[in-house]
Image (cartoon, grey):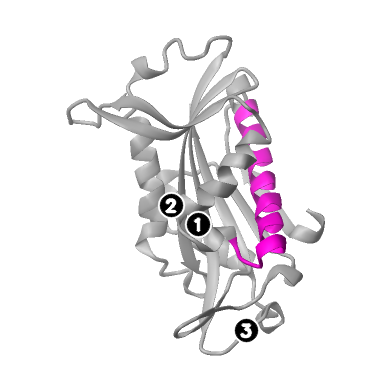
Amino acid sequence: MGNCGQVGKEFYIEDSGGGVIVSKDFLERLVDNIVKRSVSYYETTRDYAFRHRERSMHSVVCPSIADITHTFLMEYPLKRKPSGGEQQGGFVDYLISYRKCTFFMEFKHSFFAYRNAKNPRKNIITRFQSALDQLRSIRKNEYWGLGRKDQWVDKLAFEAIVFYKGSKNKIYMSDLRGESFKSSFSELMKNKEWNSLKPNLQALWILNKRLVKPVEFSNGYEIYPAVAFVGKVIL
């Protein structure tokens, strides 16, 4: 990714049908676009779009989707029926049409103290689980006939996981020499709860060192050296 840093992606989708091929293509392009737009935002503002909460990061995710397809809606209204529950109204973050495929996509965002990979924050996993539950509760008649000319309807759970380290003093990328963000991400994904959710996309963006600067808070500093993306395609 040139001056953005290093981006690696792995897919674990065994089915090789057309919907899977399109889903892989869409997610791969989405990750790349989020990286590029996040860097563009930083270069203009010297702030990180991803260091804020989920709602703020939609400002990067939404135009990244628009770079891929103009046919999408945010906060698409629909009906849900949770397992064992009553039918209720709700919304899905994105309804997307791309290459004869319709996607329902839920996006989540969390922070990861990567030095504590063996004991991560609970909400990293529970938010991804929440996205899966939201997608699975969508009634089938909500997407029958949605396809128009589309041939497949897939559901996508997608989460950005922001790596951070806190310190009382200013810290820089050069202070992190010898630390392996790949190992930390791998350790996180070995968590037994992740195994039960079976995500089939894992991607890791290690920022170019020129982009990694300390952010000051009232009680010290934080640094953000990497962002992971975890996804699951539900066919």
Residue at 58% over, 21% down: 101
Residue at 68% over, 36% down: 67
On whether residue 198 falls in the magenta region, the answer is no
Q: Position of residue 157 (x, y in %)?
A: 47, 40
Residue occupying the far front of the picture:
45
Residue type at the position of mark 2: Trp
Q: CA distance from mark 2 to mark 1?
A: 6 Å
Regarding mark 1 in the picture, which secondary structure is present there? helix
Residue at 45% over, 69% down: 118
Q: Is residue 134 above or below residue 140?
A: below
Residue 70: quarter of image:
top right
Q: Mark number for residue 189? A: 1
Q: 133 and 59: which one is in front?
A: 59
Regarding mark 3 in the picture, which secondary structure is present there? loop
Badge 2 density bin: few <14, some 14–19, many ≥20, Cα 10 Å: some
Q: Mark number for residue 78? A: none
Q: Where does label 3 land, which residue?
A: 171
Q: CA distance from mark 1 to mark 3?
A: 26 Å
Q: Is residue 36 above or below residue 88?
A: below
CB under 8 Å between discs 2 and 1: yes
Residue occupying the far bottom of the picture:
169
Q: Position of residue 95 (x, y in %)?
A: 49, 28
Q: Where does label 2 land, which residue?
A: 194
- Reading the chain from its start, which is encountered first: label 3 or label 2? 3
Range shown magenta: 22-48
Residue 92: quarter of image:
top left
Q: 231 left or right of 180?
A: left
Q: How many tags in the picture?
A: 3
